[in-house]
Image: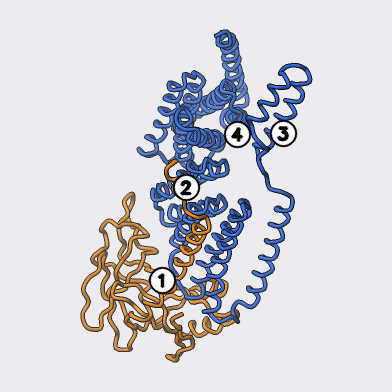
Chain colours: A orange, B blue
Amino acid sequence: MNRLRRALARVPRPALFAAAGLIQVALIAAMVIDRASILRQGTEITLDTRPVDPRDFLRGDYVQLRYQISTVRLDALAGTPSAGKDAPLYVKLTPNPDGFYAAVSVHLEPVPVVGREVLIKGRIAYGYNCGGDVRIYCHSADVTYGLERYFVPEGEGRVIESARNQGKVSVVAAVTSDGRAAIKRLLIDGKPVYDEPMF
Amino acid sequence: MFDRHYRRRLDADLVGWQANGTISAEAGDAIRRALGPMPGGIGVATVVGIAGGLLIAAAFLAFVAANWSAIPRVARLGMLLAAIAGAHALGAWFAREKRDHLADTAVAVGAIAFGASIALVGQMYHLAGDFAAAMLLWGLGALAAAALTGSRGALAVALVAACMWSGTRAIQFEDTPHLPFVAFWLVAAALALLWNSAPARHLVSIAALVWWGVNGGDVPNPAFVWAAGTALLLGGGLLVQARGPEAVRMLGEVGAAYAAFATIPVLAFAVFDVSGTPAISAWLIVCGVLGVVFATGASALMGRPSLVLASAAIALMLVAVGLSHAGFAGSEWLTKAAALAAALCLIVSGMLDDTRARVIAGWVALAVVIAAITWTVQGSLLKRSFFLAIAGAAAILLALALGRLRPREAER
């Protein structure tokens, strides 16, 4: 302990303060760069949104988004022991004839995809705790993908809410090969209303 | 701060002792020379300076918030990064000027700005990741700053963020006990030992209790979860303060003091009519038993029989909580008897050790238990009166026994 204290005392104090600040700046920068890399490298998919309870739709200045793929069937997993709410799930998506991506299967580990298929990583919000004393997967689950919030300038959320209630809102997301996703565009009636820049 | 109070009192005493001849003038001067100059505190100018800095920071934040959405996103990101870098640069400047309190505050402000930046970047870039992960990131950044700069304020920020991370995992994700927090806490405790700092000791002790508190948050009656945590911290604290370097012993002392106060809500939960059977599992029983073993070990190591009473208090607290809602005839009276005995053991052990925290905690616990017995509606009023009379008689017998033992100890 004393050796460590002496070693730290030998380093100039301004250098230690600079290192502390740099670590925090680097962590924030990493958040932004990681998202930019998803937008740059990810495969574009279009997702159809679903109605959300209006009371829960607009909280503060962000829009709560819910997708067709937010509820998935767990066919093969149903009845098997679940790893809990925080365990990742991999949902294989494929485009419908209308262009929107839909879930075709759910997996606990990444699986290969072919053609226009995309594998997106999510976390289970509901559907992991069926059964009595032991947690087992239910027949269907609510899954979040990190695409459920879209922050808008103050006062603009109501317009999107109204459009969403009429089934006019869709989202273009970028999905990387390891399943991470980020919102790239928000569309109303198929026309982009918000286009996300890299930075 | 406490050093300055002690020095003022000692200086006053030295003057008195020299005046009445208790010590010679030379001896008094020698003591003063051995103590060295009065330790520096936070001056009025520094306090006013901190207040002024905080007001300017608040004004700047309000101004930026008013125009936030009108500022281009990259500029907003730049402002956030500049706030973090600026706070640390200011801290470095204060450190170079030997203004340690201001340097500590600047790093703490930087750590808070870092947390705010995580939230705002999440908003600006639509990152809907989970709240717990953001709290962990905040905690790690603040902990790194604390480790590098020695900022107690940054350590406080780190532990608050870590408790929020662990609490979210425990309650929202039902991930109990949330063991990854222990690794985070051990690093914080290592810093408290490295610095041998009183504020850091208090912070890590409080964080340990908060962690145990939130780990019981997802069950209807968390009394046994809390009891096991309190037992482990109290017993562990007593054992740690028995041997080892001063920093370790001081950490044990502070941890044990906080754990003593944590017995109050635990005993209250045991004796008040709380819905649901206490959640008891094997790992909790192991933690509770370890607490008893540690306290007994501390008694053996330090050669203090008084710590056997602290060990008994822990065991009785566990029994009280374990028996509450046991369901067999008379279990409620056994619970109350065990809770009363636990509080009494805590008081007596604290008095024998001259440890104020255990004495105060024991008295408050005793008051809470008596209040519960008097006001809860279990049994008839006559039965409750009979029970309290027996408890009072047992306490008087204990007092007589202690009265006989104490002079003998004093003679030794």
* Element on which disc 3 rests: helix
User: What chain does badge 1 belong to?
Assistant: A
Q: Amino acid at mark 4?
A: Thr
Q: Is residue B267 visible?
A: no
Q: Earlier in the sequence, mark 2 or mark 3?
A: 3
Which residue is disc 2 drawn over?
B188
* Element on which disc 2 rests: helix
Which percent across, then down, holds residue A104? 26, 76
* Element on which disc 4 rests: loop
Q: Earlier in the sequence, mark 2 or mark 4?
A: 2
Q: Amino acid at mark 2?
A: Ala
Image-based side of B282 in relation to B22, left or right: left
* Element on which disc 1 rests: loop
Which of labels 2 and 4 is toward the front? 2
User: What chain does badge 3 belong to?
Assistant: B
Crowd rating for badge 2 (residues with CA inside 10 Å; few <14, some 14–19, many 20+): many
Which residue is disc 1 drawn over?
A146
Give the answer, above or below, for where B355 lies relative to A186: above
Which residue is disc 4 drawn over?
B376
Crowd rating for badge 1 (residues with CA inside 10 Å; few <14, some 14–19, many 20+): some
Give the answer, above or below, for where B206 lies relative to A15: above
Quarter of the picture containing the N terminus of chain B is top right
Q: Amino acid at mark 3?
A: Arg
Which of labels 2 and 1 is toward the front? 2
Which percent across, then down, holds residue A152? 54, 79
Residue farthest toward the right in the current orientation of the protein: B19
